[in-house]
Image (spheres, helix red, strand yellow):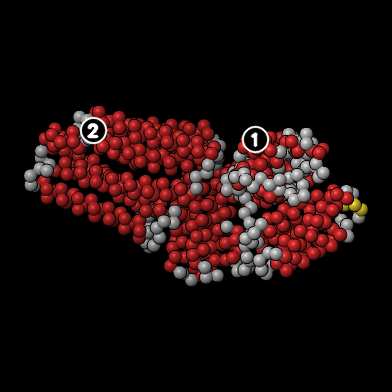
């Protein structure tokens, strides 16, 4: 990610292939933090540690010299030489720390390496790993006084030392865990999965900060929007030291905030401002890539701006301001289409400016101050009602049809399908909340392919039902052929259809609700959901009651038109979701409205898919009418 950004900006930096960059960075960080334990006021305080600092300075110079060619390489090597001379002269610890930290930052700018975990670290896992692998040296409390500590020539790091902890980022700890420290008992744990190493790093980084600090930090974090803008994502949090944050907000407040975030790193991922910052950054990188003539990278970054930046806040924004959400979604689609069509750079830049303004409006709408009990209730109610109605219409039509056909023994398959979808939805909620993060691409692909599958199936069902409405001998058909038409294979097909159409809606509803849940007002969210369920139940009861008294021919006719309408809606939604996932290109259709409820999106691909479904329905219905005048088949 960082590599792509720097390359498109034209810096020409090479990305190091070997381990020299992370090792050099780790050594620089170690020198910056631990040099004070070796020298004080120009005098060697610990010969062993001073010898280690001297050795590390030489290793830094050697590793930087071996790096691939880069415009920044000469300056880095020169900086390493200055650091080595300063250590040889027993320079002041503050000066050494400043030079080492500066070199480390410049190194990552010139030779980017991953800075952040892919998801919020699991601190419970970190605690278990620490107890298993680290306590013998570092102690249960991270004070460096484990049972084996006295046997070591180089004392283990005391994570509880707040002076040193303020100078260490979680990334620095991750690097040590990943590679170990040469010449010490600290071995490499590179055999552990990356997620485990990050969990250990964040767990070790919390020892110096008390629970009381964390409680105060939580209050700061939740009530101060400027803090959430300063630490918008895991990458920022992983690379940030309490000392660096203190320069902006003061040491006491910085300690409290870092105490909270190192205990709850997932908090930064719940920040709407942080997610929109990702979107802004990606769009800026996309524009830079486009200016540099790298259109492929520009398109990839534009897609990432939507999936990784805007899509995570889309559910909450839909509940707060659906109109604004539609405007942003449309503007981002048009931006990607403009990149695809090779529009002038000035036009691309203008579109980025427009999106920046829309993101400002979105940040206002998504701010904690904008949340209210009423907005949470309305959002929960409308989302479930909207998403549940499509699935309800299809499932109720299937149930009504089976009752009309006197095939009650097949009903358990339909009920098993929608109940199974609800159970799968519960597992999805648990996974999305406690185990994994569901990416924007995964969401769009699930919605897209699920919608298209349901659309194709409903097309055939709708045409079949329309044909039975046109037949004068429908009663004989049901009596003589329904047993074959609804075989066990067909029953399982109905199970699959019920599962797919319901799970598709449950999947999207869960992601909306998971986003609303993090905003608080859980009671009103449940009240909104309960109200929507009650209304959907009333609609289902009314439909089943009405269909029971409806003549069979009219039932088939009305059901056929319902299936046809849903086919067109789902086709549009399916194509739109695959466009948002980057599977299908986007060609804007000027003047066309965006009506999400009807699956109508202003792109040629989406509208063409709907027109194709309309033509298929019309052809099927016309063929049925022609067959109706001949012998019943």
Q: In this view, does 65 lie above or below 460?
A: below
Q: Position of residue 159 (x, y in %)?
A: 75, 41
**Relative horizontal placement of residue 287, taking residue 154 as reference (left or right):** left
Depth order, front residue of 244/364? 244
**Numbered label attached to residue 415:** none
Depth order, front residue of 5/385? 5
Q: What element carries label 2?
A: helix
Residue indicated by mark 1: 128
Residue indicated by mark 2: 402
Q: Position of residue 276 (x, y in %)?
A: 56, 52
Task: State the image quarter where residue 561 is shown.
Answer: top left
Q: Where is residue 354 in the image (x, y as percent from the top left)?
A: 52, 61
- Name the quarter where the C terminus is drawn: top left
Task: State the image quarter where residue 478 is shown.
Answer: top left
Q: Earlier in the sequence, mark 1 or mark 2?
A: 1
**Relative horizontal placement of residue 350, taking residue 555 as reference (left or right):** right
Residue placed at 38% from the left, 58% from the top?
Answer: 602
- Name the quarter where the N terminus is drawn: bottom right
**In the image, which is nearer the foreground, mark 1 or mark 2?**
1
Residue placed at 37% from the left, 59% from the top?
Answer: 603
Task: State the image quarter where residue 210 is shown.
Answer: top right
**Relative horizontal placement of residue 322, taking residue 195 as reference (left or right):** left
């Amino acid at each position: 990610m960082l590599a792509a950004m720097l390359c498109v900006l034209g810096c020409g930096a090479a990305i190091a292939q070997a381990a020299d960059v992370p090792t050099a960075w780790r050594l620089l960080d170690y020198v910056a933090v631990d040099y004070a334990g070796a020298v004080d006021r120009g005098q060697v305080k610990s010969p062993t540690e001073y010898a280690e600092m001297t050795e590390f300075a030489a290793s830094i110079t050697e590793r930087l010299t071996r790096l691939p060619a880069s415009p920044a390489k000469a300056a880095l090597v020169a900086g390493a030489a200055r650091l080595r001379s300063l250590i040889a002269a027993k320079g002041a610890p503050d000066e050494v720390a400043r030079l080492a930290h500066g070199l480390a930052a410049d190194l990552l700018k010139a030779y980017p390496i991953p800075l952040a975990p892919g998801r919020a670290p699991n601190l419970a896992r970190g605690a278990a790993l620490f107890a298993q692998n680290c306590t013998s040296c570092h102690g249960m409390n991270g004070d460096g006084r484990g049972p084996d500590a006295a046997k070591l020539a180089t004392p283990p790091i005391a994570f509880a030392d707040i002076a040193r902890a303020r100078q260490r980022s979680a990334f620095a700890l991750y690097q040590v865990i990943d590679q170990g420290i040469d010449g010490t008992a600290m071995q490499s744990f590179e055999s552990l999965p990356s997620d485990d190493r990050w969990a250990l790093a964040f767990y070790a980084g919390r020892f110096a900060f008390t629970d009381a600090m964390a409680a105060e930090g939580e209050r700061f974090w939740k009530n101060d929007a400027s803090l959430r803008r300063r630490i918008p994502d895991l990458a920022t949090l992983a690379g940030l030291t309490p000392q660096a944050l203190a320069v902006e907000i003061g040491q006491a407040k910085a300690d409290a905030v870092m105490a909270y975030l190192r205990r709850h790193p997932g908090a930064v991922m719940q920040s709407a401002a942080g997610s929109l910052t990702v979107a802004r950054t990606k769009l800026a990188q996309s524009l830079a890539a486009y200016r540099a003539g790298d259109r492929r990278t520009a398109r990839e970054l534009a897609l990432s701006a939507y999936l990784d930046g805007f899509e995570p806040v889309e559910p909450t924004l839909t509940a707060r301001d659906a109109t604004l959400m539609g405007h942003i979604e449309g503007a981002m689609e048009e931006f990607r289409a403009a990149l695809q069509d090779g529009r002038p750079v000035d036009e691309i830049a203008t579109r980025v400016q427009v999106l920046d303004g829309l993101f400002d409006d979105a940040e206002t709408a998504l701010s904690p101050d904008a949340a209210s009990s009423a907005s949470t209730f309305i959002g929960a109610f409308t989302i479930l009602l909207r998403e549940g109605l499509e699935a309800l219409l299809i499932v109720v039509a299937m149930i009504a049809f089976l009752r009309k056909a006197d095939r009650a023994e097949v009903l358990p398959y339909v009920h098993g399908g929608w109940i199974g979808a609800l159970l799968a939805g519960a597992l999805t909620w648990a996974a999305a909340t406690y185990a994994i993060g569901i990416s924007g691409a995964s969401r769009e692909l699930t919605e897209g392919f699920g919608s298209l599958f349901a659309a194709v199936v409903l097309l055939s069902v709708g045409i079949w039902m329309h044909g039975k409405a046109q037949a004068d001998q429908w009663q004989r058909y049901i009596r003589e052929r329904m047993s074959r038409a609804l075989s066990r294979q067909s029953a399982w097909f109905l199970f699959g259809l019920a599962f797919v159409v319901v799970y598709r809606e449950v999947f999207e509803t869960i992601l909306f609700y998971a986003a609303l849940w993090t905003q608080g007002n859980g009671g009103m969210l449940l009240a909104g959901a309960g109200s929507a369920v009650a209304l959907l139940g009333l609609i289902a009861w009314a439909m089943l009651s009405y269909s029971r008294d409806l003549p069979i021919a009219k039932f088939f006719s009305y059901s056929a038109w319902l299936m046809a309408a849903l086919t067109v809606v789902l086709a549009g939604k399916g194509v739109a979701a695959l466009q948002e996932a980057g599977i299908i290109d986007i060609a804007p259709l000027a003047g066309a409205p965006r009506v999400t409820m009807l699956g109508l999106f202003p792109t040629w691909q989406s509208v063409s898919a709907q027109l194709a479904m309309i033509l298929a329905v019309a052809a099927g219905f016309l063929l049925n009418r022609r067959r109706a005048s001949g012998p019943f088949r």
